Image: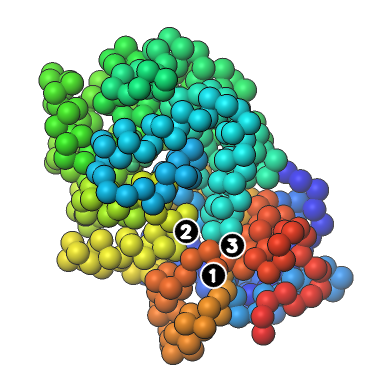
Amino acid sequence: MNAQSPTVYRAAILHFLSDPDVDGENAYQFFEDGALLIENGRVLQVGEAEAVLASLSSDIPVVEYKNHLIIPGMIDTHIHFPQVEVIASYGEQLLDWLNNYTFPAERQFEDKEYASNIANFFLDELLKNGTTTALVFGTVHKQSVEAFFEASEQRNTRMICGKVMMNRNAPEFLCDTPESSYQDSKELIEAWHNKGRQLYAVTPRFAITSTEEQLQKAGQLMEEYPDVYMQTHISENKDEVAFVQELFPDSKDYLDVYDQFGLLGKRSVFAHGIHLTPREHQRFRETGSSVSFCPTSNLFLGSGLLDIKELEEEQVAYSVATDVGGGTSFSMLQTLNEAYKVTQLNGNKLSALKSLYLATLGNAKTLQLEDKIGSFKEGNEADFAVLDFNSTPLMSLKQSKCKTLAEKLFAMIILGDDRAVRATYVAGNCVHDRDNSSASQTNQNKEVGAA
Ligand code: GUN
Ligand code: FE
């Protein structure tokens, strides 16, 4: 991937091997004094520091983060890069929010330079929050996605992005046609899918903004390129669900609209899925499609409370995501905080271990990427975040009162945000260093964490 001599990162280390709700303590590895050995952008070894260091030659540099926790880079399975500036827009639910705030903002991305500036800002913001992979919406403009992939390629981040396909129920300045959306998407797939770490997602915005002809073109792309992703929205808002039923009176339900055009499958990610029926759950299960749970967005837009316990009972795969700019934070920690509260309101619990599993390995699995990212399995790409147990006075005080790992992780999730991310590494390179504004290679053989 990239030429890099072996380096050891020493700190507390946590990563998952499977779902802790299923496998309990066998689902994760935690090393209080751990070491992560990286070379050429990949994980070579993870374990107790003493054992790892004893097996290595003494001249290998050791970067030590005292009182910090290293976890795999977090993964966000649903976010819109052109909506950075839409975040925190007051007073509307989904359909009015789209018309009043989002569509006007997305218009600006016809300008490639504007798109590049926002793409760079967006990626830096993700990295600052410890997120190293995301499934990302562009706008209807092909150049918005070119700008995004160029910015991601520069950082060597593993990102999935797609050009929005939309040809009705939106302002004319944001509409493409079935044919042009097919052509543009095809050219983007040919140019960017699997180029370095970049991956493509066919992206019909949602059933309301595409005609049958356009959804048919999206299905054609999925057939022609079976290893690309598909991302869209579903059953987020009750008015939206009713409108879809009006537009597609012959469909069994909302999911059936997508199903009829061959858009379901293991690489298909449907944002929200709050108001799904048992039949839709069944089709999710049968096809291996997944729901992306976006708690900050669902609360902010008043969309509803997704019941993840019900999804588990129905064996529907799900992941967690920010959905910025409907969502209100880039931080996956803050997203998990709100996921906990939504789950509480549904009368259930979401443990800290399950939460961090979801943000790393769980999300990687829904993207079929668990052989590359999401854990420190040997050979995986070395994307990781360094979390600070003393990021604020309140975090410090609370952590000093926590006795168990579960308590410490829970406090990290509830109180943590970008301030809790001390550093972020992508393919073994430091791409964000909170305490040194010009992020670059960390000093070797130095203790870089606060004592
Ligand atoms: N449904 C269709 N488009 C969008 C969008 O941009 N954001 C959200 N949250 N839902 C949508
Ligand atoms: Fe969205």
Give the image location of residue 74, x and y in percent. Answer: 51, 56
Is 278 left or right of 45, judged from the image as shown?
A: left
Quadrant the C terminus occupies: bottom right
In the rendered view, tell whether residue 195 sits above or below residue 447.
above
Amino acid identity at mark 2: Ser
Is 170 left or right of 161, judged from the image as shown?
A: left
Q: CA distance from mark 3 to mark 2?
A: 12 Å
Q: What element does badge 2 sit on?
A: loop
To which residue does mark 2 refer?
A: 331
Considering depth in this image, is 117 or 401 the residue closer to the camera?
117
Nearer the camera: disc 3 or disc 2? 2
- Report if residue 258 is visible in the image: no
Q: CA distance from mark 1 to mark 2?
A: 10 Å
Q: What is the count of numbered marks?
A: 3
To which residue does mark 1 refer?
A: 420
Residue at the spot 71% in from the left edge and 62% down from the top edge = 437
Disc 1 residue: CB within 8 Å of ligand 2: no
In the rendered view, tell whether residue 418 sits above or below residue 140.
below
Q: CA distance from mark 1 to mark 3?
A: 10 Å
Give the image location of residue 370, x and y in percent. Answer: 50, 48
Q: Residue furthest right?
A: 59
Residue at the spot 14% in from the left edge and 32% down from the top edge = 242
To which residue does mark 3 refer?
A: 385
